[in-house]
Every structure is written in C-alpha cells, then in structure tokens.
Image (cartoon, helix red, strand yellow):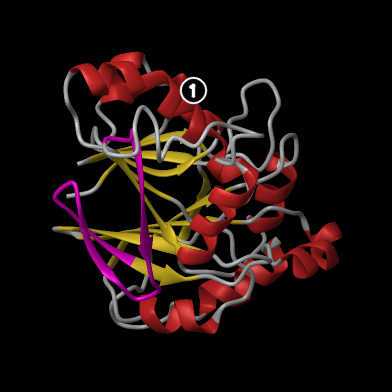
Amino acid sequence: MLIRVLGCSGAIAAGCRTTAFLLGEDVLVDAGTGVGDLRMDELVRIDHILISHSHLDHVLSIGLLADSVIRAREAARRKPVKVHALAPTLDALRAHIFNGVIWPDFTRLPSAEHPVLEFVPIEHGQRLLVGNKAIEVLSARHTVPACGFAVEGSEGWWVYTGDTGRNPALWHRLREMKIAHLVIETAFGNDERILARISRHLAPVTLEGELAQLAGPLNPSVDVYITHTKAGETETVMAEIAQLKTPHRVQALRPGQTIRVG
C-alpha cells in the first residue's frame, strides 16, 4: 500500500497544503487543503475519512469533498463516505460546520435516507478495519479532543501522531509496536517553545524528549518524518532538529511524497 502525502504544513502559502494523507485509493487520514489536489475520479473513490481532531486545518475539505462527489456517488449508488472521528470531534463538526450556516448538512443530503456522508464515532485504543486496512486509534493530547492513527503493514506500522504535545501514554503504546514510519508534528521552532507548550504542539527541544521514550528493542532506529511545520519555518525547525541527539533517522515530510507500507 502506498501512502500519499497530500498536505503536511501547519498553515497555507504557495506550495503549502495542510494535513491530509491518502492511504491506497479509498482512505483519507485528515482532510486539510491538500485534498484539493486530487483529481475528481480520485475524490469519488474515497470511502473513508479518519479525522484526528476538529481544527480547521485538518477538517476543512470534508464538506468540500462531499459537495464535489455527491452527484457521482449518487448516480453510482455508492454508500456514504464514512467520517471516523472521536465523538466530541463529530459533535463539533455538526455544530460548527455542517449546520446549514457555514455549510450544508451533508449527513442528510441528498436525502436523510441516503446521505453522502456518515459520521462514525471512534475511541482511543480501538482497532478498526477500514477499507481492508488494519488501523489503531492512538492517544493524543491537544487543546481539543484528539487522536492519532497507526496503520499496520507486514514490515511494521505507519504511525501518525496527529497534533499532540507531550504524551507519555502515546509512547507507552508505541514501544509495544514495531514501527516502520513515524509521522510526528513539530509545529514551532525552539524560540516559540512556550507557544508550543501552551498550544500542545511540539518544538525541537520537546521532540527530543518524546523520541527518547521510543527506546526499546523493537525500535532501535526508526524513519521519522516531521510534519505540520508552519509555512516558511520548515528550514529553521529542521536545522534545530538536526542538532538533536537521537538514533532515529529524522527528515522533513514533503508534499507529494509517497511512503510504501508493506
């Protein structure tokens, strides 16, 4: 299975797309502005969307995707696109986006009996089978209820932490998993580490301590990809990360990049 990086920035600017990953052909992990780079036929094939939390940079393409594919999926009699998220995240989407004011309620369109979107609640620690992909819902600590996701492959897990600050519960679980790829957000440079702490994002100085908790026989050295850097700050953040002492292979995630999960 190929995972396509549609967006991996923490803000928009030319060449920057906010968080979205395409797993195979039918599953999105988060739905930021990067979804807009997919062709129409690719959008129509998406059957599942996994959402880490309710912040706009991760959810804004859900409604736009629904509006784009509603006619084609209805004509083909496709089932609703299932949006999997924590219950508080789904509540936020209903109250603040799909409310008929910001955007139409596509969980009731084109009809309540056959909508284009279906909301599916998930919980931390839950194991899912989504589009024939084995996925575990991971713990995250953010300013709103949040989670990450781990996708199982034959050679290890692809792990996306979502937006999270320091989180011992996450590392306790990851030490038990053979990790092939770790996608972890580091939004701010060290000069903004106070802001990172308040907003429950990581900075390089806090990333070092988090990665140190991965130590163990299963994961002596992991491919680590940095995501969610703010537009225009990637070089600064990566230069500071380059000074860290870690056995892991750390690099910046790039839009358009593909990662193969065996």
When asked about the image quadrant of residue 201, the answer is bottom right
Asked if the stretch drawn in magenta spans residue 131, the answer is: yes
Does the image show residue 255? Answer: no
Classed neighbour count for the residue bearing mark 1: other residues with Cα under 10 Å, few (<14), some (14–19), many (≥20): some
Number of dots carrying numbers:
1
Task: Pick whichever, 10 or 102, lies toward us.
Answer: 102
Is residue 138 found left or right of 156 in the rendered image?
Answer: right
Q: Position of residue 153 (x, y in %)?
A: 19, 56
List the residue tagged with mark 1: 36
Task: Pick whichever, 97 or 21, lies toward us.
Answer: 97
The residue positioned 61% from the left and 39% from the top of the image is 9
Does the image show residue 179? Answer: yes
Q: Position of residue 50 (x, y in %)?
A: 38, 50
Name the residue furthest front.
Answer: 112
Asked if the stretch drawn in magenta spans residue 71, the answer is: no
The residue positioned 37% from the left and 80% from the top of the image is 173
Magenta segment, principal secondary structure? strand
The residue positioned 44% from the left and 35% from the top of the image is 106
The residue positioned 71% from the left and 26% from the top of the image is 13
Q: Position of residue 251 (x, y in %)?
A: 51, 48
Residue 203 drawn above or below residue 141: above
Element assignment for label 1: helix
Magenta stretch? 114-136
Amino acid type, label 1: Gly
Is residue 57 found left or right of 86 in the rendered image?
Answer: right
Q: Position of residue 124 (x, y in %)?
A: 40, 74
Q: Quadrant of the N terminus?
A: top left
